[in-house]
């Protein structure tokens, strides 16, 4: 990615009336989103893989193609998946499972390193590049499309990246068990980057950043950890900020990455887009209305001067979508929140940790 660190896995869109996929030229991608909730997503299979006839069970010594992966149920599917799926389908709407029974020493060589968690990691390039460039951090990518998770974990093995892991799951369906299983205090950053905007009002129930997700994050994130939100659609960023602001004072807005979030990265590390083809391709949706321009708690995160967007990415790493957007001279809409001390819950004026 140039790169991407997080919806529950709902990221890019390829229909001519929607944003294109992060790594595909305009006009490519998924089928019409006008279908009902139980429509197009189901026709492509519950795992979100394209209907290419590649659903045979492994066996008989058959050779799978490089573009194929084997899912947890044994199906062989293409890793070229749909740009979005319906997170409310029963197949997806399940709390994220805790890997290895919560024994993180089986996941990371050093499970006590500070952790970055990207919700909606798509193809996983953001975390992959982060794990390469910042080996003092562990990286987790959570993605709703299993084929992408399988392919990304294959890269982890190929490159022997012992500080990187991807998990198949839907963050908006429940992330509390996963957060509780982490070693105490290691989670320092959570990111949600360019989630599916769910432009249509009837699809607003699919959005990733919901009160439930924010409540679970604020309850289980350690004091001092940060939540980074960004989108190339301003109203999506406004929605996310409003949802966080409406959930109480445990997450407070900050303007820079605090040391408590693991800010001691190499200051010379450039914040540059990672090369990607067709970076200038795509449509401009920055001013498009989301859900008819109305949503719950609208304005809760705005100040006297409106919404304050960060001018720069504070992480030292860009997502693919962000890279593509910047390459076209378009803005990103970014906000950073920090988990405050427990006393701030009853005293909003208390300083952040």
Image: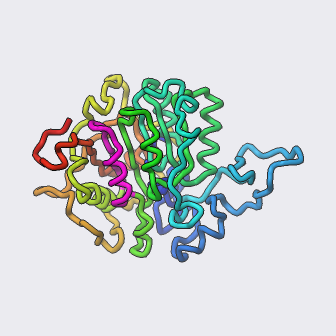
**Position in image of residue 210 (x %, y %):** 36, 60
> Which image quarter is the C terminus in?
top left
Identify the image's colour scheme: rainbow, by chain, secondary structure or one colour. rainbow
Q: Quadrant of residue 150?
A: top right
Q: Is residue 13 above or below residue 348?
A: below
327 vs 24, left or right, is left
Q: Residue at x 18, y 58 (%)?
A: 302
The magenta-colored residue range is 209-232
Q: Residue at x 49, y 24 (%)?
A: 110
Q: Is residue 289 above or below residue 68?
A: below
**Position in image of residue 325 (x %, y %):** 40, 49
Is residue 29 shown to the viewer in this render?
A: no
Q: Residue at x 42, y 55 (%)?
A: 195
**Position in image of residue 104 (x %, y %):** 52, 33
> Between residues 224 and 319, which one lies in front from this camera angle?
224
Is residue 90 shown to the viewer in this render?
A: yes
19 vs 189, left or right, is right
Residue projecting furthest to the right: 60
Q: Is residue 23 magenta?
A: no
Q: Is residue 224 magenta?
A: yes
Q: Is residue 261 above or below residue 151?
A: above
Q: Residue at x 55, y 76 (%)?
A: 35
């Amino acid at each position: 990615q140039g790169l991407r660190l997080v919806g529950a896995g709902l990221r890019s869109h390829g229909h001519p009336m929607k944003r294109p996929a992060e790594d595909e030229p305009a006009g490519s991608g998924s089928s019409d989103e006008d279908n009902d909730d139980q429509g197009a997503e189901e026709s492509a299979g519950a795992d979100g893989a394209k209907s290419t006839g590649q659903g045979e069970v492994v066996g008989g010594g058959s050779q799978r193609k490089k573009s194929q992966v084997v899912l947890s149920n044994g199906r062989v599917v293409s890793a070229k998946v749909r740009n979005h799926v319906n997170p409310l389908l029963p197949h997806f709407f399940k709390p994220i499972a805790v890997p290895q029974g919560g024994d993180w020493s089986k996941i990371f060589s050093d499970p006590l390193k500070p952790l970055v968690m990207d919700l909606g990691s798509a193809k996983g390039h953001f975390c992959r590049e982060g794990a390469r460039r910042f080996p003092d951090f562990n990286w987790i990518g959570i993605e709703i499309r299993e084929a992408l998770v399988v392919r990304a974990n294959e890269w982890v093995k190929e490159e022997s990246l012992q500080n990187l892991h991807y998990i198949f799951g839907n963050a908006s369906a429940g992330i509390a068990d996963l957060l509780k299983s982490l070693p105490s205090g290691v989670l320092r950053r959570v990111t949600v980057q360019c989630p599916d905007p769910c432009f249509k009002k009837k699809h607003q129930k699919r959005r990733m950043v919901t009160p439930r997700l924010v409540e679970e994050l604020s309850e289980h994130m350690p004091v001092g950890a940060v939540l980074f939100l960004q989108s190339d659609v301003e109203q999506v960023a406004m929605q996310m900020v409003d949802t966080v602001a409406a959930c109480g004072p445990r997450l407070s807005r900050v303007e820079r990455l605090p040391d408590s979030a693991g800010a001691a990265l190499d200051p010379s590390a450039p914040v540059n887009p990672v090369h990607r083809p067709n970076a200038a391709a795509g449509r401009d949706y920055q001013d498009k209305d989301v859900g008819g321009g109305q949503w719950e708690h609208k304005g809760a995160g705005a100040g006297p001067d409106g919404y304050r967007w960060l001018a720069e990415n504070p992480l030292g790493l860009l997502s693919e979508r962000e890279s593509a957007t910047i390459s076209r001279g378009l803005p990103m809409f970014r906000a950073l929140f920090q988990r405050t001390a427990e006393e701030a819950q009853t005293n909003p004026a208390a300083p952040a940790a």
